[in-house]
Amino acid sequence: MARIAVVAGDGIGPEVVAQARKVLDAVLPGVQATEYDLGAARWHRTGEVLPDSVLTELAGHDAILLGAVGDPSVPPGVLERGLLLKLRFAFDQYVNLRPSRLWPGVAGPLATVKPGEVDLVVVREGTEGLYAGAGGTLHRDTPAEVATEESLNTRHGVERVIRDAFARASRRERRKVTLVHKTNVLTHAGSLWSRAFEAVAAEHPDVATEYQHVDAAAMFLVTQPQRYDVVVTDNLFGDILTDIAAAVTGGIGLAASGCINPEGAYPSMFEPVHGSAPDIAGQGVADPVAAVLSAALLLDQLGHPEAAARVTNAVATELANRAPDVPLRTAEVGDRLAGYAAG
Ligand code: NAD
Ligand code: IPM
Ligand code: MN
């Protein structure tokens, strides 16, 4: 039976993860879930962010379900870098998979788009780019202060994520991959991404390709999200574009993600795209759908496609029946989803 590590984290993290667990229990009875107390509370209590012993224990699980990390009472970056990014990097989760669909019943903000018309997936590079942590500060707190932040791009790292995007596209109906970068300005990394993209594309004559600069892609995601099938891009561009993709498909409360190590050498991690939402934490009003759909991605990754489909269908039922103006209660949505998924 699957052994899952649960890192509920901060803010609304525990609220939405509790619902994802109800749904997991409903479709995969006997699943073993172990809770790990990591995040702001632990840091305040002990000064620890992610002890090596915990990292080792997490490595022994089949997958990780994560809520959200980050809290206004903790300096920016301590938890985001020390916990979330450390897990993505340590477990070589180089495919950050972020699907977006406009579900029937969901009133998206775009008058030009009908439900069912948007079905895209962003394959965001997860271990390199501007997130790698290269850079530094000189002459801190003087008028001469200089801060640099360098983007790390390796042929190995770029090619493997592009390869994953093409493999995914060739299993989809439209079989199209869009590379998004900024090759007109970022000429070093842009050239590497373009050449790797062309090399992998040559191995997939059945997959259509296109290239867009990231500024244009940001615009087209808002004006014509229907045009995308698989989008492959670097770590920071993917971070920003997936919040846009979420916004145009009904909001960040519906956006799921998987931080995947495709080889299975390490556990993959599944988490909503959203953060800890301090503005609504503790009120029981966060939408748990993103966390529940992340659990569906987890089930797929662990080889339980039928269970994953039951969860996805439960979400479809929930969203098709949602009254637009009725405020939602997190736990009630979780109970309904678990009920639908149990069948
Ligand atoms: P956020 O995603 O937490 O919140 C942005 C807005 O979306 C807020 O108004 C929030 O209320 C709303 N929102 C988010 N999730 C929602 C849900 N499930 N249902 C309804 N509304 C929802 O982003 P932020 O405010 O930029 O960041 C808050 C903290 O979370 C920061 O510390 C940040 O570093 C962290 N963060 C963590 C993750 C993660 O753990 N994967 C992701 C993003 C941000
Ligand atoms: C996300 C978040 C993270 C990211 C932060 C919290 C490190 O915004 O998962 O999208 O930038 O990847
Ligand atoms: Mn983000």
Image (cartoon, rainbow, N blue to C red):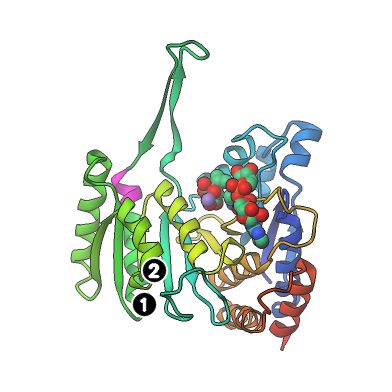
- Residues at discs 2 and 1 in contact (Cβ within 8 Å): no
Identify the residue under disc 2: 225
The answer to whether 93 appears left or right of 325 in the picture is left
The answer to whether 116 appears left or right of 29 in the picture is left
Specify the amino acid type for callout 2.
Pro
User: For residue 258: magenta?
Assistant: no
> Is residue 14 positioned above or below 22 on the image?
above
Q: Earlier in the sequence, mark 2 or mark 1?
A: 1
Where is residue 109 drawn, in percent x and y?
51, 68
Residues 140 and 295: in front is 140
Residue at 57% x, 38% y: name it: 81
Residue at 32% x, 43% y: name it: 154
Callout 2: 10 Å neighbours few (<14), some, many (20+)? many
Mark 1 vs ligand 2: CB under 8 Å?
no
Identify the residue under disc 1: 171
> Is residue 166 positioned above or below 29 on the image?
above
Q: Give the range drawn in magenta.
A: 154-158
Where is residue 86 drawn, in percent x and y?
56, 42
Residue 26's disc is none
